[in-house]
Image (cartoon, rainbow, N blue to C red):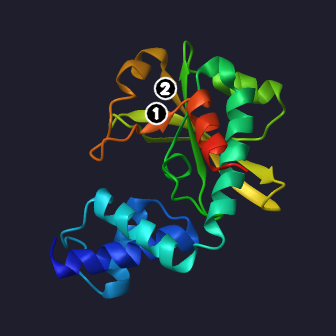
Amino acid sequence: MNALKQEIAAIAARMVVEEGLEFGAAKRRALKQMGLPPRTALPDNGCVEAEVEDYIAIFCADTQPAELMALRELALDWMQRLERFRPHIAGAVWHGTATRSSDIYLQLFCDDSKSAEIALIDMKVTYEPRTVSGFQGNSVDALSVHVFSNALQEYVGLHLLVYDLDDLRGALRPDSRGRSPRGDIAGLRALLHDVGP
């Protein structure tokens, strides 16, 4: 990778860690901050993720493990509440690069796309519906909630992405680094157990 892409990735990584930005938004802001044209070639997400890991190791090594554990415990609580929708966790909380600025992303695999929304209504949870790009590139419904973390003593963004049950079949293929791109309740429990006391 060339030096310019490396610099973009490093600046984007800082924004991901410190501000909780998504990779795409962080790369676009890095371009703007550097005064580069919008059509400048961007580093891929793998490069940004490697820079995020380096940034955390250098600047957040003393705080990030506890913050990650708090986010994973909060995610597990919500996965258990929504267990009937076959929840899977993805993103920085699953891959271990989350900090207190990161949001939690849960993917729900439902027989009926409105059932998750009805469940939140039944739980008296206020949510904001929107449409986002799913892991297959198609549009999916997302239900965004702010939930309180006792461990962090602040609100955290929780995004529930609603998929059809059939989408679960292709959801567990390894990513470019050979990792599972998402994990179920048992997978998250195993991660918590591995780093727990």
Q: Which circle, 1 or 2, is nearer the viewer?
A: 2
Identified by mark 1, the residue type is Val
Q: Quadrant of residue 114?
A: top right
Give coordinates of residue 192: x percent, y percent: 65, 43
Pointer 1 with pointer 2, Cβ within 8 A = yes
Q: Which residue is mark 1?
A: 140
Nearer the observer, 20 or 142: 20
Give coordinates of residue 88: x percent, y percent: 54, 32
Q: Residue at x 66, y 64 (%)?
A: 100
Q: Tell which residue pokes out farthest to the top in this image.
A: 111
**Could you tell me if residue 159 is visible in this image?**
yes
Identified by mark 2, the residue type is Tyr
Give coordinates of residue 113: x percent, y percent: 56, 20
Nearer the observer, 69 or 17: 69
* 59 lies above or below 77: below
Q: Secondary structure at mark 2?
A: strand
Q: Which residue is mark 2?
A: 163
Q: Could you tell which of marks 1 and 2 lies nearer the N-terminus? A: 1
**Could you tell me if residue 115 is visible in this image?**
no
Quadrant containing the N terminus in the rendered view? bottom left
